[in-house]
Amino acid sequence: MTRLGKGLERLTLRTVLGRRHLSVALLAVGLAGISLTLMGVLALRAYANHNLHLIARSINYTVEASVVFNDSSAANEALALIAATEEVADAKVFDDNGDLLAHWQRPDDGMLAPLERYLASTLLEDPIHLPVVHQGQPVGRIELVGQGDSLMRFLLSGLIGIMLCTVLSAYGALSLSRRLFGDIVGPLRSLANVAHAARCERRFDRRVPPAQIAELNELGNDFNALLDELETWQSHLQSENETLAHKASHDSLTGLPNRAFFEGRLSRTLRNALQNQESAAVLFLDSDYFKAINDTYGHAAGDEVLITLAHRVRAQLREHDLVARLGGDEFAVLLAPIQRTEDAERIADKIVASMRTPIHLPDGQVVVSSLSVGLAVYPDDGDTPAELLNAADAAMYHAKHLGRGGRHNAEAEHSAASANTGVKP
């Protein structure tokens, strides 16, 4: 059973089919048993009535002489001799005047005797009356009442048979319901499980297994085909989402992360550095002579310079370091973690040195560019992403003033400012 709202329960298909099978089987067995029992009772009634007529004739022949001679003792003896061995409950012999000449009655020696009498009075004919004839003249009559013992035995055996058939039918119905569960309910349950997994868990890789019944197998195949389409659509949508997410967070020209991506990564890195008591460094890079190259050789040449710059910077970094294009010819590098400031300085110097190699443009021309790099270290030069970027940016501009194609530390800038004001750094 499955639960519904407010405590209600819905029956499963297996339970419903099992109950329907059992109900139909029990109803069919009950109707068949009752029909057969009624037919048997009717047949037995006809047989019992016919048998009573035969017994009456036999008694008639036997007591004829006793009635003619009005011998009550002989009549009782003859009557008891026959009636005691037959299905007779009560037998009487009357003479020609209607006086009782002989009487025999079966004793009530059982608990079912009243029920037997009731069955006899209900199902058998009224007491049979047969005249005693001697030489063509009636000399008396016989009155005979049948016994219900045979009817009782038949009804009891019929009832036992119905109960036995009912038990066997119930067992057969349960067996059929289990088999039906395997043939019908099983595939439907598999279909329901796959549909549930697709709807709730977004799992479109599961499939409905083949079924023996053609209609259910066709339904499963159609559902699997629908899942194939949904899986293809989901893969396409996921790929589109990944592409859009990449475009939203990366620069289309160089393929590097953009400013938003860099600032988010920088915020997370500084939180981790604070928790782990680590240091990190930010490099602010700006291309020297980029405007001149762009104006002289064109935008295509400027794009090639930016692409080459991105590749060369990336080649100087460690695997877990990050380089991003902030916009125009400005780039930023995140180095985390670092053990010493000298490690960041060494990487910055390698980046500056990598740009000394001439850049070959697509039209065959060769240009030489350089980078000015500003270095800021966390937490010495700033505690927040904005402070650290601003410190690195200021150090980069100081590097340009000192001479293009070099590196300058924010700490050195602080020291110089402190010396000029007479304040100890």
Image (cartoon, grey):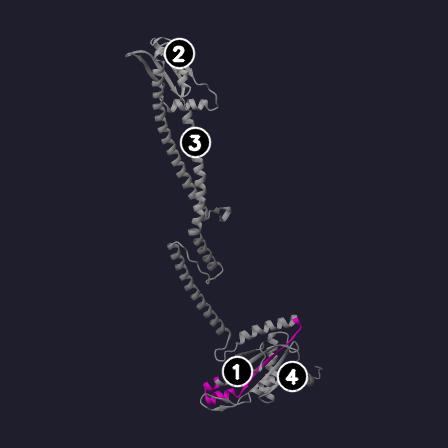
Q: CA distance from mark 4 to mark 2?
A: 154 Å
Looking at the image, is mark 1 or mark 3 earlier in the sequence?
3
Looking at the image, is mark 1 or mark 2 earlier in the sequence?
2
Q: Label 1, on which residue?
A: 311
- Contact? badges 1 and 2 (CB < 8 Å): no
Q: Label 3 is placed on what type of residue? A: Ser
Q: Label 3, on which residue?
A: 157
Q: Residues within 10 Å of mark 1 (few under 14, many from 20)?
A: some
Quadrant assignment, res 77:
top left
Looking at the image, is mark 3 or mark 4 earlier in the sequence?
3
Q: Quick one: SS at disc 2?
A: helix
Looking at the image, is mark 4 or mark 2 earlier in the sequence?
2
Residue closest to the eye, 49 or 137: 137
Identified at 41% across, 29% down, the residue is 154
Looking at the image, is mark 1 or mark 4 earlier in the sequence?
1
Image check: 147 left or right of 315? left
Q: How many marks?
A: 4
Q: Quick one: SS at disc 3?
A: helix
Residue 144, position as x, y percentages in the image:
37, 18
Q: Label 2, on which residue?
A: 74
Q: Residues within 10 Å of mark 2 (few under 14, many from 20)?
A: some
Whether residue 362 is visible: yes
Q: Residues within 10 Å of mark 4 (few under 14, many from 20)?
A: some
Residue 30, position as x, y percentages in the image:
41, 36
Q: CA distance from mark 3 to mark 2?
A: 39 Å
